[in-house]
Amino acid sequence: MKLKILADAHIPYLRGVAEQLGEVEYLPGNQFTREAIMEKDVLIVRTVTHFGEELLNGSAVKLICSATIGFDHIDTAYCDTHGIAWRTAPGCNANSVEQYITASLLYLALKYQFNLEEKTIGIVGVGNVGSKVATACRKLGMRVLLNDPPREEKEGNAAGPFVDLEMIKQKADFITFHTPLTKTGKHPTWHLADESFLHSVFRKPFIMNAARGAVTDNYALKKALRGKTISGIVIDCWENEPDIDRELLNMADIATPHIAGYSADGKWTATRMSIENLNNFFGLGITPQYKEIPQPLQPVIDLEKITPEAQLAHAVWHSYDPTAETDSLKSAPEKFYWFRSNYPLRREYPAYRVINATSSVTNKLKLLGFKL
């Protein structure tokens, strides 16, 4: 008998692939009701719906595959005690989030007229995503400080060196968060950047959140911006999505609808990992055929008429420009969910070939992943 699969209709590159493993029904993520999932064996999901006892009790669900890196939308304790396996796609969007952070850093450097090579960034959370961000920031010539207490306790400084949050608060010109959202345990991250944290920063840093909304505290961010204890914010993940804080939205330098990891490359990888998780869990032994990612509309970036000091930013923004999404969200914040569900094609650096770059910029472009 074929597996019965319910999949989020907005997961790209899944239609025509999941059908190779079972009988598939597609619904928008916010329509995953008890009735819809009751007879399903497998759910392929995003973060739109929370999967706990209220939805899962009495269902036939055996496996939840999330095409995301996080799992705070899954009641893992309930699943573990009720025979429901769950799988995520760790690292699937790491390159995409790095692209987002790099594009945002270059925008801030232009807007506020400073040189990134003279700045220090503190990265809180050094998993798949944070590690990619750290590597990119070093390629930009920045000084990088790493903070990840769970990794430090497990691995020592072999993966570091790591510093504590106090050092980051003292030394960092940018503080970017790439942690999961946790409320319990030794190192909870819920409201990690709270009023006390933001009051004690030394260099008036920019705060960047492309992790989970509640890692930063809305009220504390607004108070810190008004009090000028921080210089600005880049915020992709929000508390209370999709009903985001309109005042905070208007105060942000970059404000996007939780799409930092939404490159086509990252989505394709998440879909592939979800299919692999399903295939392996049930021991199907199927070799699925995947769809190809569409090429960008303008795959060649010509820098001939761009001044040398602007070439790096021009190339990065050609691949991804966060200001366009910021303008859209600020103009229509009520469309937060629509923007996420109807996200346009976005490709990562390797999909582009750069021509006529000056020799002083070529190495950085190559290090980031552009073809030359």
Image (spheres, rainbow, N blue to C red):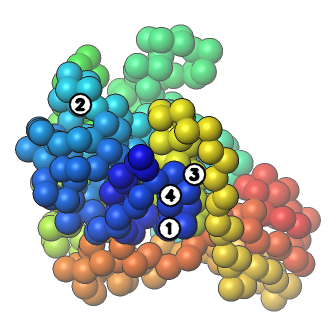
Outermost left residue: 54
Q: Secondary structure at mark 3?
A: helix
User: Upstream in the sequence, badge 3 or badge 2?
Assistant: 2
Tell me the residue that label 2 is attached to: 79
User: Upstream in the sequence, badge 3 or badge 1?
Assistant: 1
Q: Nearer the viewer, mark 4 or mark 2?
A: 4
State if disc 4 and disc 1 touch (CB < 8 Å).
Answer: yes
Q: Which mark is residue 15?
A: 1
Seen from the viewer's position, the closer of residues 126 and 69 is 69
Kind of residue sitting beneath label 3: Arg
**Which residue appears at 27% of the width and 74% of the height?**
336
Q: Pinpoint residue 312: horizontal percent, then vertical percent.
A: 72, 68
Determine the image quadrant of residue 306.
bottom right
Seen from the viewer's position, the closer of residues 83 and 47 is 83
Instruction: State left or right for residue 298 relative to residue 260.
Output: right
Q: Marks 4 and 2, how far apart in space?
A: 23 Å
Kind of residue sitting beneath label 2: Cys
**Which residue appears at 28% of the width and 69% of the height?**
28
Q: Pinpoint residue 350: horizontal percent, then vertical percent.
A: 75, 62
Vertical relation: 305 (above or below) 138: below
Tell me the residue that label 3 is attached to: 272
Outermost front residue: 1
Tell me the residue that label 4 is attached to: 18
User: Upstream in the sequence, badge 2 or badge 1?
Assistant: 1
Q: Nearer the viewer, mark 3 or mark 1?
A: 1
